[in-house]
Image: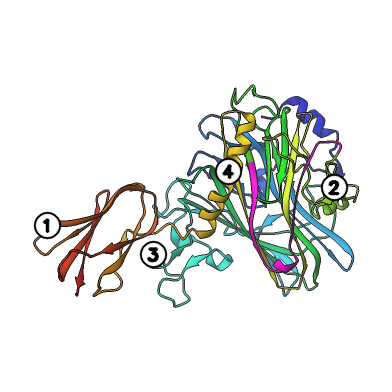
Amino acid sequence: MKTNLKLAGMLMIVMLISGVVFFRDMPEERGITYRSLDANNIRTYVWDAGMFDRGNGGVAGFSWPKESNTYAIYFSGLWISCKVSDSIRVSEGYYNTNFRAGYFDFLTQSPKGFDDSLYRMYKVSPQFPNGGGDLDPWIKWPVNQGAPWVDVNNNGVYEPPTDYPVMKGEQNLFCSFNDGYRDSLQSLSATLPLRAEVHMYAYARANSPCADAIHYEWSIINKGRSQWTDFSAGIFSDIDLGTSNNDLAGTDSALGLVYGYNGTPTDPIYGAIPPAVGIVVKSAEGHSNNRADFASRWRCPFDCPTDSLEMYRVLHGLRISGESWVNPYTNQATKFAFSGNPVTQTGWRDSLPGERYVIIGSIFGNVPSLDTIQFSTTSLIKRGTSNINSIAELKNCVNSVINVSNNSENVPAKFILHQNYPNPFNPSTTIKFEIIETGVVSLKIYDMLGREVRELISARLTPGIYSEKFDSRNLPSGAYFYRLQSGEQVKTMKMLLLK
């Protein structure tokens, strides 16, 4: 958690940009909206202005475990940068933000939508098509703003409940924002805007494998008339694992990971076994041949960027001086600083526990007008058997979390049992089904007399789309029924075995 000592230290680097202190709290009158994600054991807050992991009123926002009132991250934000005709452009969420809800109009080359109440943070769930609480009904999902959706009847018209939002988790967020509003700068960046429009989709799954995680998908559109040169995008995060002044950080280029961990075996808030927290760059699309990832950690005031030039350098994998990071163990320049292994105590490792700030992202190269860059990130947290073992456990979970995210289909909107395929069949067929709630699921095969001949599934499953192969060996030809039960929901269908 933040302390007065931390605030005092950070205020030393506060700068006045156009007469605005970038550290001021986010005023509610600006109309910036947020929603929480707490489907698993993380609770965080995501804002419609390119920032997340921040609570209302300028307090820490990434809580784990979610009911414990203990925090692992104080603030996170999207950073983007490029050059336009050799002029540096930077926009970022850095405690406050250059972004505002809305869109960037290509024809007029101006930002719009901030004064439109329809441009805000939206939240939907597959279990609640009519909304409720802080959930929006599916019918309000802003497909006209770019929100992803499933066109079930393939007519190009959003018609819920037949059509429905893309829902990769039990909780799903969307917002559209842009960096065109520069009338009241609230950060370190004093540059002209990139003229970027950003569509953010985020989700949380109730049963995240291996580690609790929050997933983010970013679509960044060049709405200006000029090409972006050397475009880069990244996620900045102020890591505070319990107490904020005893942390360390590191990177792992093989995993595309930046992480923070407790520099001492015991944390005054988390106790004897503090967790490790990390951010992963999962995937990126658009000019991927030119893509180069980067990650680093800072200690303020030594490494923290204090103006747009330094931010641009950081977003291109450099030190704030413009020099490359150099691994002292190999004497090689690198874009992944402090990439040693604290678990095995080898390589270039962080030292002197204290405040830690991290960034991870990708350099994409040149982006023509109206082109789109897409990249995905995941924030995850894991507790091991010690502060150091928590790092090992976190790293062990990265691939599991990424694989589920990259392969995840929508959390189904309805309980569905599909017709088996092929049908008729011999000797085997596949039965596909969709469930919308976590619970014990059974899938059984019956003959025409109602006798059970095979139990294919009897297990506790999470919401998702499943398929099960049925092998009919040792069964005679004829008609059979297959029955799916999930909680109180039951469906039965007929299939034909021909030998």
Q: Secondary structure at mark 3?
A: loop
Along the viewing direction, whichever of 110 and 470 lies nearer the viewer: 470
What secondary structure is the magenta-colored segment mainly? Answer: strand
**Mark 3 or mark 2: whose residue is earlier in sequence:** 3
**Mark 1 or mark 4: whose residue is earlier in sequence:** 4
Q: Which picture quadrant has residue 292?
A: bottom right
- Distance between the Cα atoms at labels 1 and 2? 70 Å
179 relative position to 487: left or right: right
Tag of residue 451: 1
- Distance between the Cα atoms at labels 3 and 1? 37 Å
Along the viewing direction, whichever of 26 and 366 lies nearer the viewer: 366
Q: Which picture quadrant has residue 476?
A: bottom left
Quadrant where the C terminus is found in the figure: bottom left
Q: Residue furthest front?
A: 474
- Distance between the Cα atoms at labels 2 and 4? 26 Å
Q: Are marks 3 and 4 in contact (CB under 8 Å)?
A: no
Q: Residue 312: give x, y in percent of width and height.
A: 83, 54
The residue shown at (63%, 39%) is 277
Tag of residue 325: 2
- Distance between the Cα atoms at labels 3 and 2? 52 Å
- Tell me which segment is drawn in magenta: 278-302
Tell me the kind of residue under disc 1: Arg
Quadrant where the N terminus is found in the figure: top right
Q: Which residue is mark 4?
A: 396
For residue 334: magenta? no
Q: Are marks 1 and 2 in contact (CB under 8 Å)?
A: no
54 relative position to 413: left or right: right
Tell me the kind of residue under disc 3: Pro
Q: Which residue is mark 3?
A: 161
